Image (cartoon, rainbow, N blue to C red):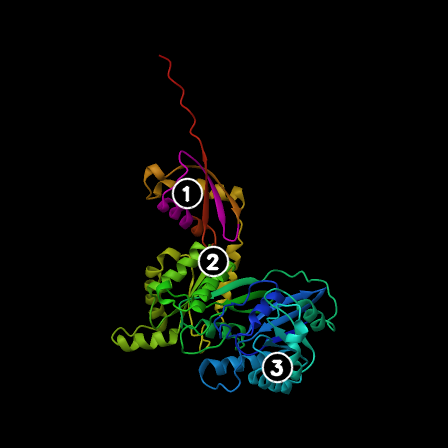
Amino acid sequence: MSERLPLVAIVGRPNVGKSTLFNRLVGRRRSIVTDEPGITRDRIYGTARWCGRSFEVVDTGGLVPDERAGIPAEIFRQAEVALTQADSIVLVVDSRAGLTPLDAELARRLRVFGKPIVIAANKVDTESRTTLASAFFELGDPVFPLSAEHGLGVDELLDHITRQIPETEAEETSPATHIAIIGRPNVGKSTLLNRLVGDERSIVASEPGTTRDAVDMPVERDGRSYLFVDTAGIRRKARTKLAAEKLSVVMARRHLERSDMAILVADASLGVTAQDASVASYADKAGRSLIVVMNKWDLALQQAREQDKTKKLSPTELQSEYEKIVRERLGFVGYAPIVFLSALSGEGVEGLFEHIDRVAGARRLRIPTAELNRWLAETDIGRSSAPSSQSPEVLYLTQASTDPPTFVLFTRGTNRIHFSFERFLQNRLRERFDFTGTPIRFIIRTRAQKPRRARAS
């Protein structure tokens, strides 16, 4: 495993532009940015590179040190974890608002960590940058006046941050499997992420919608690399009112589309809901591989035993009965394996990695054309229930790509095939080849019918 990169923590009170600076440093829109304060709640990590020097950056939630209730207190605790791990600290302040008592209190508390502190006086968009930032020298030195939004002055900050970091070649590493943890609000996505990575990276609270930004965490396990992304709870648009909530749902779907696979987390104690099915459809339409996790399975088992004491089914039998119900309600993603676990207790979580590895392998599986066409010759196409007008004459088949597995179907007679014919081919392919957990796509290529010769009279 490569040596850990130096870690720079970005901290400050709410709405001073920490996430804008974070996005500027890592070179992409990773953290959500709006005018509404309190958007970032968890620790968001990214990698930055400047003049041949690489370092890691962590964005933290807006800090209110004296707030002890609920999520604000948890945000402060999450930030303290980042500050303990950090090699240096960037305290972001708002030059337009001037020096506030909260800025001074945060600077005082940061000195306790014994780390080098840099003051980033943000929102300086004029040439008189030094004048606007001069008030903040009271907090410490150095002070860098800058505009994170427009990039003004950020170069000087980067020069200072990286001055003691040695130049290195950009490492070529095997790509990690990107896994988006998706689901409706309050089903245990963040608890599952914390359990998978063995670190309390996501804030866990009973309040729905706690996670707004996507929280990602790389994991190395048995020589394999994973990147888990805990996304915001996806809910119906009609129930999404705040601008931050709407944007977090958009970002959740965007992170899903950039991932290799998704873990759909549902609450087993409540059963599969229409919203669970809607979230699953996002993954299917995006072509992402899928694993369905029925979380809180221990609670669901307890409920089942209390409701039906006559059958006295074993846990295995109850799970089998429950799986049938899940399959019925999520029939359109029948290719997805179903895992029963409790993220809170950890029961069943270890086995989830085996499913992830199998699904990741299936997503990259490539079948040689000769083997595909031997399979095609052995398949009774006539068994399809599709109308004969939309059951084309299949000439041959080849695999065009992976991620997800995509096949080109060369046919004669029509460039459209009935959905039931496509489903028939998908099911037969799955019977022969291991495409567990991954959708299958078809591209139709039509060859024109040969004209019939006129009979001689």
Q: Secondary structure at mark 2?
A: strand
Residue appearing at x 62%, y 60% in the figure: 174
Residue appearing at x 61%, y 76% in the figure: 9
Q: Secondary structure at mark 3?
A: helix
Query: Can residue 219 be seen from the camera position used here?
Result: no
Tag 3 residue: 84
Badge 2 vs badge 3, beta-carbon distance below 8 Å = no
Mark 1 vs mark 2: which is more N-terminal?
A: 2
To which quarter of the image does residue 142 belong?
A: bottom right
Instruction: Let me know if residue 433 is in the magenta part.
Output: no
Amino acid at pointer 2: Ser
What percent of the width, then of the height, locates residue 263? 46, 64
Q: Residues within 10 Å of mark 1 (few under 14, many from 20)?
A: few
Instruction: Let me know if residue 422 is in the magenta part.
Output: yes
Name the residue nearer the viewer: 86 or 349.
Answer: 86
Residue appearing at x 37%, y 44% in the figure: 421
Residue furthest to the left: 310
The nearer-to-camera label among 1 and 2 is: 2
Name the residue nearer the viewer: 165 or 396.
Answer: 165
Q: Secondary structure at mark 1?
A: loop
Q: What is the number of the mark on residue 379? A: 1
- Check the image and report above or below for 408 versus 236: above
Amino acid at pointer 3: Thr
Q: What is the number of the mark on residue 289? A: 2
Q: Which residues are magenta?
A: 402-428
Q: CA distance from mark 3 to mark 1?
A: 61 Å
Query: Can residue 412 be seen from the camera position used here?
Result: yes
